Image (tube, grey):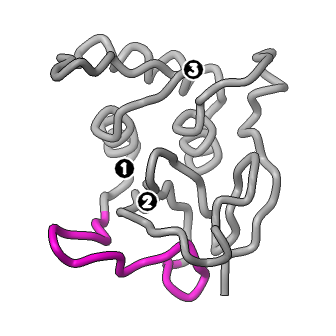
Amino acid sequence: MPAPWVYDDGGRQAAGYKGHAGDCAVRAITIATGLSYADVYAELNLLAQDERPRQGRKRSNARTGVHSRTAGRFLEAQGFTWVSCMGIGTGCTTHLRTDELPAGRLVTRLSRHFCAVVDGVIHDTFDTTRDGTRCVYGYWAGP
C-alpha cells in the first residue's frame, strides 16, 4: 500500500520564500528535524561552500538542488543515521510504502528527489509515491 500523503511545504511560504524552487532537500530536512526553513536553507548553502564540483557538476544550492552527500552531512550532524536500501546489482528492494519503511522521522532519498516521511505519512508538496512503485535508494532515520 502506498504511503499516505499530506501537503507540506516545510514552512517555505511562512518564511517568506516565493516562486518555484527545487528545494526538496530543504523542505524534507525541515519537516524531519523540526528546524526552521530559513535556518536549514542557510546551513545547506554554507555546507555547499566546501564541495568540490567535478565532472561538470555545480555546487549544491538550497534553492536549485542539494547533493546527497551535503544533505547527509547536515542530517548526520543532527543525529540522523543513513540506511542504504539499494546496492550495486540488487535492484529496487524498498519502495515508498508504509509496509516497507520503518516508523519515525525519515528523510528519504529517491531518484532526483528527497521527501520527508513521518510515521508512515509522506510530507511533501506533491504525491511522490508513483502508486507505491517509487524506489527508495536509502533514508536518514531520525534520532
Q: For the residues marked 2 and 3, what is the alpha-carbon distance in whole angstroms?
A: 26 Å
Given the image, on which type of amino acid does mark 1 rest? Gly
- Read off the residue under disc 3: 63
Circle 2 or circle 3, nearest the eye: 3
Q: Secondary structure at mark 3?
A: loop
Q: Is residue 95 magenta?
A: yes
Q: Position of residue 96 (x, y in %)?
A: 55, 72
Q: Which residue is mark 1?
A: 79
Q: Position of residue 123 (x, y in %)?
A: 70, 56
The residue beneath circle 2 is 143
What's the amino acid at mark 2?
Pro
User: In x, y percent, where is residue 75?
Assistant: 39, 43
Q: Nearer the viewer, mark 1 or mark 3?
A: 3
Q: Which mark is residue 33?
A: none
User: What amino acid is at disc 3?
Assistant: Arg
- The answer to whether marks 1 and 3 mark residues whose Cβ atoms lie closer than 8 Å is no
Residue bounds of the magenta highlight = 83-102
In the image, residue 100 lies in the stretch drawn in magenta: yes
